[in-house]
Image (cartoon, grey):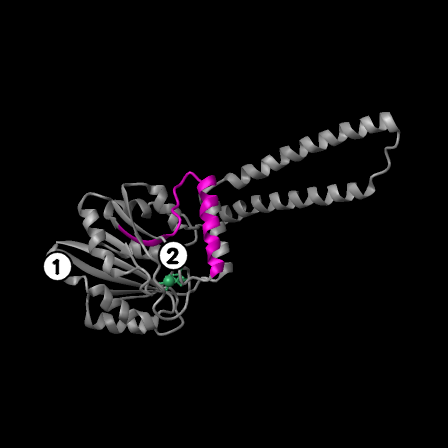
């Protein structure tokens, strides 16, 4: 008998857990027929509400339910990694607790794995019901397409079903700055994409503010592209060339008109422009340095407080 492990990252999701559990278990008959046992891992990412208590209650009545509680909020990426480490299934799937990843899609996804695909991934084709500011994500994906060789799909969700082989490949990437959408693309394998319309969150509210998403996008860029570093070097060359042209211009002007001292305002403009570009490029280098610093510290990705 094969095992399908579902990993559910939860951060303050007490109102959604029970609904999610029932919705997920609607697939029970389908998988029993396929001779696949189900197990559920709720990863409580340092929730401040009763999430852990609700899961414990569920686990009391159903031994297929597991709980991993973090010592604090480590973020969804850490929860995904913890889930992968804990799950023993032949197949693993990630789902959000808020039912934005419809469990009713699982039989179809499993069908493709049976056909021989290694991963079945999902993406939403619409973003209806989302705050308009989040449409900026589109810009991020368009940029990533240009500057990264790793394929990162626009609208891709973390809702993915994968085989043990893919799980082990992802686990072998022990980096601290985890950007799953990039990691999934990086490991490759045969991937089937399913599309669905955006579903609004059942209860509670999103944990991603615009600012948090913005910082997350910088994580993604530094983790999967070094193009910004090349850009910094390019700016250096560009400004050297411009400076060279200016030197020639000044010498020629002096030779013809004999007035080398005028031009104080333009000097100030040029100095402030160039120092701005310099600081910007230094900032880019600093971002990579900071990420490297965090990597070399080799801190654990998450810490477990309690496990059931
Ligand atoms: N989540 C988490 N840790 C966090 C933030 C979110 O485990 O620090 C979980 C959350 O409980 C949910 C999933 O990640 O199950 C997606 O979060 P959310 O629905 O807030 O994001 P959105 O769907 O708006 O992108
Ligand atoms: Mg959500």
Residue placed under numbered mark 1 in the picture: 32
Residue range corresponding to the magenta coloring: 132-161
Q: Is residue 207 depicted above or below 219 in this figure?
A: below
Q: Quadrant of the N terminus?
A: bottom left
Asked which secondary structure carries label 1, the reply is helix
Mark 2 neighbour density, 10 Å: few (under 14) some (14–19) many (20 or more)? many
Residue shown at 54% from the left, 47% from the top: 287
Q: Nearer the viewer, mark 1 or mark 2?
A: 1
Quadrant assignment, res 157: bottom left
- Of residues 139 and 84, the one nearer the viewer is 139
CA separation in Å, label 1 and label 2: 31 Å
The mark that comes first in sequence, 1 or 2, is 1
Which residue, given by chain and number where applicable, does mark 2 sit on? Answer: 78
Q: Looking at the image, in which quadrant does ligand 1 appear?
A: bottom left
Q: Quadrant of residue 84?
A: bottom left
Whether 148 is among the magenta residues is: yes
Residue 216 seen in the current view: no
Q: Is mark 2 within 8 Å of ligand 1?
A: yes
Q: Position of residue 76 (x, y in %)?
A: 39, 59
Name the secondary structure under disc 2: helix
> Looking at the picture, does residue 10 appear above or below residue 106?
below
Screen quadrant of the C terminus: bottom left
**Residue 22 in the image: above or below residue 151:** below
The residue drawn where x is 40% and y is 72% is 48
Determine which quarter of the picture holds residue 44. Answer: bottom left
Can you give x and y, in whole percent of width and height, for residue 25 in the image?
20, 65
């Amino acid at each position: 008998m094969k095992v399908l492990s579902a990993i559910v990252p939860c951060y303050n999701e007490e109102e959604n857990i029970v609904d999610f559990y029932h919705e997920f278990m609607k697939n029970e008959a389908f998988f029993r027929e396929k001779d696949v046992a189900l197990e559920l891992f709720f990863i409580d990412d340092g929730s401040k509400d009763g999430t852990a208590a609700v899961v414990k209650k569920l686990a009391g009545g159903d031994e297929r339910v597991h709980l991993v509680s973090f010592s604090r909020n480590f973020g969804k990426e850490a929860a995904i990694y913890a889930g992968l480490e804990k799950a023993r299934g032949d197949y693993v799937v990630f789902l959000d607790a808020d039912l934005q990843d419809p469990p009713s899609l699982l039989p179809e996804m499993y069908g493709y794995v049976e056909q021989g695909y290694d991963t079945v991934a999902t993406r939403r084709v619409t973003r209806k019901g989302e705050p308009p500011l989040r449409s900026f994500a589109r810009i991020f994906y368009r940029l990533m397409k240009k500057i990264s060789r790793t394929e990162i799909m626009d609208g891709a969700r973390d809702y993915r079903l994968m085989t043990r082989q893919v799980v082990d490949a992802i686990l072998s990437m022990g980096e601290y700055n985890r950007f799953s959408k990039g990691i999934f693309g990086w490991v490759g394998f045969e991937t089937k994409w399913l599309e669905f319309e955006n579903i609004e969150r059942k209860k509670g509210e999103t944990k991603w503010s615009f600012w948090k998403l913005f910082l997350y996008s910088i994580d993604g860029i530094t983790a999967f592209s070094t193009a910004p570093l090349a850009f910094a070097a390019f700016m250096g060359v560009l400004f050297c060339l411009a400076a060279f042209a200016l030197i020639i211009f000044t010498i020629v002007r002096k030779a013809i008109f004999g007035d080398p001292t005028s031009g104080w305002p333009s000097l100030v403009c040029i100095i402030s422009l160039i120092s701005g570009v310099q600081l910007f490029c230094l900032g880019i280098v600093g971002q990579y340095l900071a990420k490297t610093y965090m990597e070399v510290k080799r801190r654990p990705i998450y810490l477990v407080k309690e496990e059931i």
